[in-house]
Amino acid sequence: MKFIVPVLAAAAIALASGTALAQPRTDLVLGVVLEPPHLDPTAGAAAAIDEIVYANVFEGLTRIGPSGEVLPALSESWEISDDGLTYTFKLHEGVTFHDGAPFTSADVVFSLDRARAEDSTNAQKGLFAAIESVEATDPATVTVTLSRPQGGFLYNMGWGDAVIVSEASAGTNTENPVGTGPFRFESWARGSSIVLVKNPDYWGDEVALERAEFRIIPDAAAAVPAMLSGDIQAFPMFPPDAYEQVQGDPRFEVVIGSTEGETLLSMNNGREPFDNVEVRRAISYAVNRDEVIAGASNGLGTPIGSHFSPANAAYVDLTGTYPYDPERAKELLAEAGLADGFSATIKLPPPPYARQGGEIIAAQLRQVGINLEIQPVEWADWLSTVFTDKDYDLTIISHTEPNDIDIYSRPDYYFDYQNPAFNEVIAELDVTADEAQRNELYGQAQEILAEDAPVVFLFQLPKVGVWDAKLEGLWENMPVQANDLTKVHWTE
Amino acid sequence: MTLFLLKRIAIGLVTLLVASMIVFSVMEILPGDPARLMLGMNATPEALDALREQMGLNAPVVERYISWAGGMLTGDFGRSFTYRAPVIDLIAERAVVSVPLALIALTLSTAIAIPVGIFAAARRGKLGDTVSMGTAQIGVAIPNFWFALLLIYVFAVWLRLVPAGGFPGWSGGVWPGLKALILPSIALALPQAAILARVTRSAMLEVLGEDYIRTARAKGMPRRKVLWRHALRNAMIPVLTILGLQFAFLLAGTIIIENVFYIPGLGRLVFQAITQRDLIVVEGVIMLLVASVILVNILVDVAYALVDPRLRARS
C-alpha cells in the first residue's frame, strides 16, 4: 500500500495547481476615447489625465468617492475650527511615493503652495483661492488657514488638481508621474496605450489588479469590435452612439450612469434680444427637451431644469418650469416686440451631442419664427471665440465640472448673465459649511436660475459604461472624471 | 544628370522655405489659444499668462518664426506644448509605425495593380478586362473605413486571427508588430491598387496603340515580349507619378484608417496637434512631410530618367 502515498501526493498537487489556475485574472485592458496630453493632473484641465491617474497613481488629502462624497485619503482625519478658518489635517504615516521618498507634511505644504503660487499653471487655481497659509505642524500634521470660511474646502481638496506631489518629481510628473497611489506608472506608448502596475508598497487596502492598461481608441466604430474581439475588457466611457450594438450581448455589462455634465443651450445674455428675460423664456418654451434628449444623447440623458446634477442630494426638480409650449413661446415673443421672430446664429463645438442637438433645436425654434444659422466650430475656436471673446448668440455645451453652479455668478463669464440676488446666494454658500444650510442655498440658487432662464437647461450628459460581465468594481456614475481602479476585480 | 539633380534639390529647398512660412502663418491666423486649451474653462487669467510665458507664446511673431525656423535648421524641432516632450521624439515614435505601414501598403498595391493593369490592357474588351476593371471600379468606390471595418469583423471578431486594432510596438519582436499592420495595410492598399490598376491599364493602352509597337509586332517579336519590354517600360511614367503621390498620401493622409485601427501613426499625431493647437508639433510634422514629398518627387524624377533615356539626355 506504500504506493498510495505518492499517488495521493500527486493528486494533492494536481488539485492545488487546479485551484491556482482557477484564480481570478489580475490584468485588465480598458478603452479610453481621448489620450491625455500628459500625466500631471496639477498642470492641465484635460479630463483624460484624471481618467488615468486619479485615485490610481495620485492621491490628495481627501478624495471623491463613487457617489460624489468626500472621503479621507492621505489625510486620515481632520479637525475644523469653530470659525471655519483653520483645518488641521492628520496625515497617514508610513506612506511613500513611488520613487521611494517618504510622504510627509512637507510634501503637502509644497503641493498646495505650488498650486496657488503666482506662476502656477494649475487649471483650477480657484480651488486654492481661499487658502491663506499652509503649515507643517509636525511631520504628520498640516494646518491650513483660510482667509474666509469656505464650505466646499474639503471637496475642493479632493479634486485631481489638488493631489499631493513630491518636490523631487513635480517637474517630471508630465512624463513619469510619481504619486502615492495603489498603482505605479509603468509605460506610455504615445498614441497607443498607458500601463499602470500594482504598487506593492501601498499604504492602504491592497488592490486586486496587478496590471491595468488604458488603450486609446478614438473612433466609436472601432470601440465595438475592440470589445467584441476581447482585446479590451472594459470601456468606462463608451461612445453613446454605439452602445446598442453591445447591449444585448450577455458577455457584457452595459451600465447607464450619469456625469456632472449639465448640457446647456447657452445664450449670450449680454446681446439683444437675449438680454430680455421674456425672449429667453420664450426660447425655453420652444425647445422640446425630450426630442433633444432622444436625438442628441440616444435617449439616455436625464432632463434637467436648472444647473444641477440630479444625483446630488441638493437637487431640486425644476424640469417643469418651461414645459414644451410653442404657442406660449410665440405669445412671449410677441410681447417682447418680436412677433415676426428673428434670426441668430448657433455655434456648435465638435461633440456629437452639440452637433446633433443643435440641428434639432434649430428645427424647433423655426416653429416659433426664430431662424438659426448653424455654424460648426472646432473646439479651439469655440474656446477662444465663444468662451473667451463672448462672440456668439447661442451655443450648446456640457459643463462637466462638478458642483459648478457658481459659474453664473462669475463676472465676465461667457453667459454674460448678471443677477445680484443670485450672486448673494453664491456668496453666502461660499462661507457656509453646514450641510443642511448649504443644500437649502443650493436649492435657492437652482430656483433663481430656472426662473431667469439665462440658458436653456437640456439634460445631464449620460455615461455609458461597458465592461466584461465578470468584472466588478468600476464606477457606475462619474461624479468626478476618473476611472478609479482601486476596487476593480475579476470574479473568475 | 548631376546638374539635373542639383537643380531639383535647389528647387526643393526653396519650396521648403516657402512652405515653412505658409505653415507658420496659417497656424498663427487660426483662432484658438493653446494655453486655454491646456487649462480649460476654469483657468484663471494669471495661470493662462504663466503658461503662455512658459510656452514662449508671449514673444513677437517674427521672433518666434526665426527661432523656430532657425532651430529646425540645426535639427531642433522644439518641444510640444501639450505633450511637453521634444517634437522630434514624437515624430520618431510615429514614423516607426507610419513608414513601415506606408511601404507595406504601397508594395501590396503595386504588386496587385500592375499585373492586373497589364492583364486588362492585353485583353482589352474581353471578359478578363471587364471583370478586372469592374472589380477595380468597386475598389475605387468603396470607402476605405467601411472596408476596414469589414476586415476587422471578419478577421478579428469572427476568425480571431489578428487583433482588432492597436499597435504593440516593435520592442516585443517584429511579428507582433507586423501582425497589427496586416489589416490596416490591406485596407489602405486595395483602394490604392484599384486606382493604380486603372492608370496602368490606360497608360498601357495608349502605348499599345503607338507605331513602334506595331513595328515590333510586325518584325515578329512575340506578343508577351512586346508587352513587357516595349509597352510596360513606356507606360511607367504616369504609373510612377501616381505612385509618388500615393506614397505621400499613405504617410500621413491615413488618419481615418489610423483611427479605425487605433494605431499611433503620423496622421493621428498631426490631427490631434491641430485640434490641440499644438503649433510646434503641427509645424514640425508638416515640414517633415513637405520634405518627404519633395524627396519622393525627386526620386520619381530620377526614376523617370531611368525608364526614359530621352529625359536623361535632355537634362
Image (tube, coloured by chain):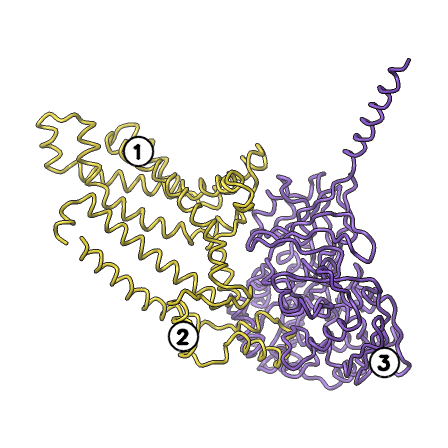
Chain colours: A purple, B yellow
Mark 3 residue element: strand
In what element is the residue under mark 2? helix
**Do badges 1 and 2 share one subunit?**
yes
Chain letter of disc 3? Answer: A
Q: Is residue A118 visible?
A: yes
Location of the C terminus of chain B by quadrant is bottom left
Whether discs 1 and 3 lie on one chain: the answer is: no
Would you name the residue on which mark 2 appears? B65
Kindly report the distance in space between the C-alpha atoms of the residues bearing marks 3 and 2: 51 Å
Q: Find residue A134 and report its horizontal and vertical position in percent.
A: 78, 79
Residue for point 55% across, 64% down: B83
Asked where in the image residue B111 lies, by quadrant, the reply is top left
Q: Amino acid at mark 3?
A: Thr
Task: Say which of marks 1 and 3 sits in front.
Answer: 3
Q: Disc 1 designates what residue?
A: B115
User: Which picture quadrant has residue B297?
Assistant: bottom left
Left or right position of B205 against B145: left
What residue did someone put label 3 on?
A: A86
User: Residue at 61% across / 71% down in the picture?
Assistant: B39
Distance Cα–Cα, label 1 vs label 2 = 49 Å
Crowd band around label 3 with a 10 angstrom C-alpha radius: few (<14), some (14–19), many (20+): many
Residue type at numbered disc 2: Tyr
Q: Nearer the viewer, residue A286 or A137?
A: A137
**Farthest residue, direction front:** A2
Query: In the displayed structure, does residue B262 sit left or right of residue A183?
Result: left
Question: Do pointers 3 and 2 mark residues of a single chain?
Answer: no
Q: Secondary structure at mark 1?
A: helix
In front of the other: A382 or B178: B178
Seen at 28% across and 61% down, the residue is: B12
